[in-house]
Image (spheres, rainbow, N blue to C red):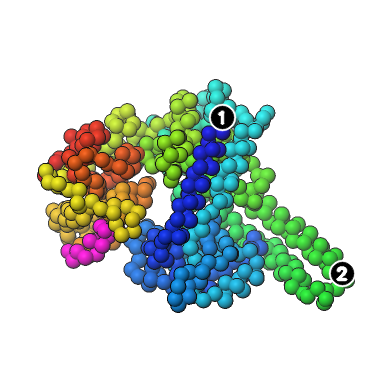
Amino acid sequence: MFEKQLFLLKEEQAYERAEYRREMETQGIRRRIKRGNCWWPVRFGRSYYNSLDRLVVEICNEGESAQGEKAEAGVPEHNFEYGKSICFFSMPSEGHPVFADTIGIVSYAEDDRMVVSLPNEGTLSRLLSMERPGVALHFDETTYRLMTEALQRVEKARGNRLAELRDIFHANAPLHWGSPNAEPSFPWLNASQQEAVRDALRAKDVLIVHGPPGTGKTTTLVETIDEVLRREVQVMVCAQSNTAVDWISKHLADRGLQVLRIGNPTRVTDEMLGFTYERRFEAHPDYPQLWQTRRDIRQLYSTPHKSRSPHFHQKTARLKERAEELELRIRNEVFSQCRVVASTLAGAAHPVLTGWRCHTLFIDEAAQALEAACWIAIPKADRVILAGDHCQLPPTVKNPACLRAGLGKTLMETIAERHPEAVRLLKVQYRMNEALMRFSSDWFYGGELQAAPSVRNRTILEYLDTPLVWINVGGEAETDENVQEDREGDSILNREEAEYTIAALHLYIEKLTPRRVRAERIDFAIISPYKAQVRLLRQLLKRDDFLKPFRRQVSINTVDAFQGQERDVVIISMVRANEQGHIGFLGDLRRMNVAITRARYKVIIVGHAETLCHHRFYRELRSRCHCIG
């Protein structure tokens, strides 16, 4: 059953490893810095042993990216985050970087500072002696190893709950449900949200909360977790990314639930850091005693062999036994005081969770997680509640062949196909007016979505505006020459269309009046599927004097970066323009679903209609728009 997945996972790993090596061999340091995969030069700060008794060192970025203008709010400047592997290099005055053998693991990351765990003190000494040092992301085999082991474990499972869940999800085993008697009432939720919460309470095996854009998936999930905790001692909450875990953790903490975050959240407030296992561990009254015991052990081992006392081994054995006793006591008390254990799916394999189980596992953003990643966490629980939307962003699969072969098909999709009775669609959305919502609802959700009365007819300019506009760029003219690879060679851009896009923003702000835009803090998003177009649009925005006062109200990024976000006005730059109707990346309609559902009031699509409308999706979308040009 899982042989194909294991094979495809191995192929994906090999492909990503080869891509990493190619990048390391062909890309210069400055290009890697630009992509957020490298810091250079860096400065090493203080080093110390953290609460998990790991040697860590602070690293500060002193390169151009640290000194330059900050990226817009909410847009990370680099890709370093908790759990990722990094390598170190020195950069002589002349020549190519020289890479060290040492691999570090990121424990915490901010804009221009991170904390990295190292193997030992000898490694630290070698790093401190490096000339003009830098750090770069390293290809990490760990997650692939965990996913492979998880698939092998579930494939071999026999006669246990893991085997039962496997057969329910992939074979013909039936679902089991509890009694619907004495159902709780949630008058503050709409009917479909109430149904999802109630059925999550009585599902014995699995339930899917399918949350289209703006339908209150997070609200429903938090309510469900709160209700489950009225019946169970603890639950586990996972997601694919640290960002998604931190988002749901914050909502649960705001609800007053005791959250224990396994794995440090990245780029979050100190308030959220206070929920991490490390901070809770350090705050325990027995921690100073444990710290001193560990220090005594290190001092004993630092004594030269010739100077060690005859009782050296007895002393170290007693101290180690005492340290293990204290650590186990602290760990048990930290876990006993929490109600929610939160981690990424890969983080569910963290050593501190060895032997820990609960009854219910929640997987948020399950439609963005590879099935193999879900199986890392599933053995921790007896039943699973999946939340997400498989009509939005899919999991990341870099090997096109693996994607075509089905590696990107998620566990959520598989269960939804095999057990449609386990799916609860949230049907009322609170983000968009009716005109913006209708196309997405008809194309992706069978026309079942409804706009809440509070948003159904809202607009910015009353009757003087249309919510959905398509600006045709290029007309009958030949436009292939406008679409080109950028200098990075990793994406494409369309200069003419980028200029039209910025002009569209300029004109709409004038239509709203600059005074009103400032006073009401109306916010805008410019979205493009292509990274190169995003970079070009950011440059054009910076050069536009009229738009200078509004830069903080304008976010420019890729479709993927806007998943889960919303803005008042969204402008989408489509980029593609050719006579053949080749649309490439735009053929992934789930990404376009994300793009067109980010706006509260208005969407402006800027694109070459003759190219895009070769595809039925874009023909239908354009037929719903007010067309210009």
Q: Three-letter amino acid code at disc 2?
A: His
**Residue at the location (24% across, 32% down)?**
616
Q: Under tag 1, what secondary structure?
A: loop
Mark positioned earlier in the residue sequence (2 or 1): 1
Image side of residue 465 versus residue 60, left or right? left
Residue 382 position (above or below residue 552): above
**Residue at the location (54% across, 42% down)?**
10
Farthest right residue in view: 310
Query: Around disc 1, counting alpha carbons within 10 Å, would you say few (fewer than 14), some (14 to 19), or many (20 or more)?
Result: few
Question: Toward which corner of the image does residue 290 lie, by quadrant?
Answer: bottom right
Q: Disc 1 marks which residue?
A: 1
Image side of residue 410 versus residue 320, left or right? left
**Residue 466 location in percent, x, y?**
16, 42
**Residue 323 location in percent, x, y?**
74, 61
**Residue 522 location in percent, x, y?**
24, 54
Magenta region, main secondary structure: helix
Query: Around disc 2, counting alpha carbons within 10 Å, would you say few (fewer than 14), some (14 to 19), or many (20 or more)?
Result: few
Position of the N terminus, as image quadrant, is top right
Q: Disc 2 marks which residue?
A: 311
542 falls in the magenta region: yes
Q: Three-letter amino acid code at disc 1?
A: Met
Residue 224 position (above or below residue 273): above
Q: CA distance from mark 2 to mark 1?
A: 56 Å
Q: Is residue 123 visible?
A: yes
What segment is highlighted magenta in the picture?
A: 535-546
Q: Under tag 2, what secondary structure?
A: loop
Choose between 464 and 163: the one closer to the eye. Answer: 163
Comparing labels 2 and 1, the label whose residue is closer to the camera: 1
**Residue at the location (46% across, 70% down)?**
96
Question: Toward which corner of the image does residue 456 lie, by quadrant?
Answer: top left
